[in-house]
Amino acid sequence: MKIIFIHGMNQQHYDEETLKQHWLNLFKTGLSHAEQNIELKSLDIKLPFYGDLLTKHQLNNSLDLNTMLPKSLSYLHFPFHLWHNTSIIEEHSPCITPLPCFNPEQSESLTQRLSVITALTKDHAFKELIMFLNHYPKLHETLMHKFLIETYLYLSNSDFMHEVHHRIMSHLHPSKDHIIVAHSLGTVIAYNLLHQFNHFRVHRFITLGSPLAFKVIQEKLTLPISRPPQLHGDWFNFYSPDDFLTAFPLSEAPFNFEPPIINQAITTLVDKPHQITGYLAHPAVIKSIVDALKLGK
């Protein structure tokens, strides 16, 4: 059984080895806190790296969502709220110990409390903005082109997409089962791969902080959107309600196919809810990977 990690955008400050080590450290931390006695050296884990391709195409990813907000968040009011039916899974511990989380029962300094409240307020404002933009795909696409260059390039540039696919496909083996764990833009890439290539098997598909629910993303995918034919097991989708880039579960049309995607809302980092740090080390994510390894034996 091979585990394939597929990273998201904004990884230009890493190279293949340092980014893989970062993910392995998070995975190891998660295994330790979940009390899973698994030796990493015994696992076949690959992390294809494509972060350098943005530099190759002479582009910069200037994601700065702060420029999309007014100076004072107190003046940011959107005319509606989107509600969806979802349930946050029960966790033995609301947050992994090393990860910062808001716990009013703990005695914290005023500075620490204000820092957490500021982060939560900003996350809420970003989430409201993204929900608003989802109703206006053209505006969303314009802003994505400006602030999320890597995502826009992958969805719109066939040469860039081909290079990314080539790097990932070089790690997939036709005679082995695979567990694919993808984060952020990596979930879009993985979804495309699972529909465009048919000479490999995926035992479990795990998406973390996926933007696939956005209409502007869906319009760039091959239609109709459907369950990947190369997926021979479950699709787990983990998202954080505080993650402003991935505020929706994959439960409504066009993702209401059978068997259904298993959507699970989890708690990630308060100050950086979209980062891989809060997702990969989470006990529910660790369990989904470990269970797949056990089933594959």
Image (spheres, grey):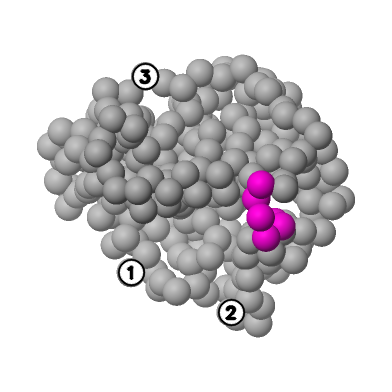
In screen coordinates, is 7 left or right of 160?
Answer: left
Residue 71: within the magenta?
A: yes
At 49% across and 49% down in the image, what residue appears? 119
> Farthest residue in the front direction?
110
Q: Earlier in the sequence, mark 2 or mark 1?
A: 1
Left-right relation of 178 to 247: left
Of the residues under marks 2 and 3, which one precedes in the sequence?
A: 2
Q: Amino acid at mark 1?
A: Thr
Q: Secondary structure at mark 3?
A: loop
Residue 222, percent from left and from top:
76, 43
Q: Disc 2 to disc 1, how far (Cα)?
A: 17 Å
| Mark carried by residue 18 | 1
Q: Amino acid at mark 2?
A: Thr
Give the spatial CA distance, label 3 vs label 1.
33 Å
Point out the stretch of residues depicted in magenta. Answer: 69-74
Of residues 34 and 92, which is closer to you in this image?
92
Q: Residue at x 45, y 74 (%)?
A: 13
Picture disc at residue 90: 3
Is 191 placed above or below 41 here?
above
Q: On the image, numbered disc 2 is attached to which residue?
A: 55
* 46 inside magenta stretch: no
Q: Is residue 44 above or below residue 178?
A: below
